[in-house]
Amino acid sequence: MPSPEVCDGLDNDCDGSVDEGDPEGSGPCDTGLQGVCAEGTLHCQGGSLVCVQDVMPSAEICGDALDNDCDGLTDWDDPDCQ
């Protein structure tokens, strides 16, 4: 019997596709990473909800008070800031 699609690796709605439309995805989550890499979004991958980081590490931008390179250090503590 068809039911709404959920993230479980099954074809719940009986349309021949599994987990289509990123079911249960799109909610905010914490990646466990540091700095700007900490914020993530839930996505259905392989039948499970996975937290995918929203921002990848980049070169440290001095003076913005953020941990751009995700090393746990902000501007004034980061030796990458000159």
Image (spheres, rainbow, N blue to C red):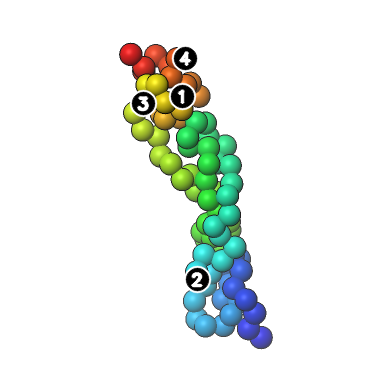
Which tag, 3 or 2, sits closer to the chain's start? 2
Q: Against 59, is 41 above or below?
A: below
Q: Is residue 32 left or right of residue 71?
A: right
Q: What residue is pinned by disc 4?
A: 77
Which tag, 4 or 1, sits closer to the chain's start? 1
Question: Which secondary structure, mark 4?
Answer: helix
Q: Amino acid at mark 1?
A: Ala
Which tag, 2 or 4, sits closer to the chain's start? 2
Question: Which secondary structure, mark 3?
Answer: loop
Q: Name the residue located 58 percent from the left edge and 80 percent from the top edge.
A: 13
Inter-mark Cα distance, 3 to 4: 13 Å
Q: What residue is pinned by disc 2?
A: 20
Q: Amino acid at mark 4?
A: Asp
Q: Position of residue 31 (x, y in %)?
A: 55, 41
Q: What residue is pinned by disc 3?
A: 61
Q: Name the residue located 55 percent from the left edge and 53 percent from the top edge.
A: 42
Q: Position of residue 20 (x, y in %)?
A: 50, 71
Looking at the rendered image, the disc whose residue lies closer to the viewer, 4 or 1, is: 1
Inter-mark Cα distance, 1 to 2: 39 Å
Q: Is residue 24 at least partly visible in the picture?
A: yes
Question: Which secondary structure, mark 2?
Answer: loop
Q: Against 69, is 37 above or below?
A: below
Q: Amino acid at mark 3?
A: Ile
Q: What residue is pinned by disc 1?
A: 65
